[in-house]
Amino acid sequence: MILTPSLVTGFPLIDQQHEQLFNIIDTLEIMASSDGSFRAVAEGTRKHLTPATGTVQPVVVRKVIERLMYYADIHFQYEESLMSYASPALTKLDGDQYEDFAKHVCLHHREHHSFSTTVTEYHKQVTSYCTLSPASIYVFVHHWVTEHIEKTDQAMCVWLRRSDAVAG
């Protein structure tokens, strides 16, 4: 995943955590690409490939989903703790502005919950031995993360900067 200026928040730890998510997305992209299995062989994961077809086995997909769940959980908790920490400082804003911040916090939490629910469903499918395409996971995660950072996270960072309670 290419790190464009629209994906940089200016908050070092948030950006570092996003980089971890980007690495997972890159792994999904490699797995989903037509020659991804051959790249995976070059990276030393031959034992996880089906030699006849070069397709990625479910155990590899499961491990990537578990890694995604782990990093997303840590990252979402961190962002939500920042918003909680900034909240008292933002109560000084007039009522409408604070209400806008409160709405943002709810929206942000809903988006995190929606993402986690979808990824948990992917995990259930792959642990139930259902066929799950790395391409479908990649498309969902890439789109969701890009949209979420460019819109929701960037808006959160504006609020955090306004609060002066959180260093960017």
Image: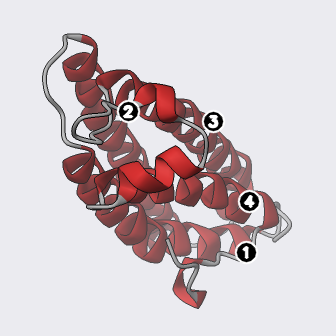
Tag in front: 4 or 3: 4
Residue drawn at x 71%, y 51% as measured from the top left: 88
C-alpha distance separating marks 1 and 2: 47 Å
For marks 1 and 2 on the same chain, the one whose residue lies earlier in the sequence: 2
For marks 4 and 3 on the same chain, the one whose residue lies earlier in the sequence: 4
The residue labelled by disc 2 is: 49
Identify the amino acid type marked 2: Leu
Identify the amino acid type marked 3: Ile
The residue labelled by disc 1 is: 161
C-alpha distance separating marks 3 and 2: 30 Å
Q: Position of residue 27 (x, y in %)?
A: 48, 52
Give SS at disc 4: helix
For marks 1 and 4 on the same chain, the one whose residue lies earlier in the sequence: 4
Which residue is farthest top? 128
Residue drawn at x 29%, y 54% as measured from the top left: 32
- Residue 30, quarter of picture: bottom left
Foreground residue among 135 and 113: 135
- In the picture, the quarter occupied by the C terminus is bottom right
- Residue 158, quarter of picture: bottom right
* Mark identifier at residue 16: 4
Foreground residue among 39 and 80: 39
Identify the amino acid type marked 4: Gln
The residue labelled by disc 3 is: 74
Instruction: Check whether the beta carbons of the residues at disc 1 and disc 4 lie within 8 A of each other.
Output: no
C-alpha distance separating marks 1 and 3: 22 Å
Tag in front: 1 or 2: 2
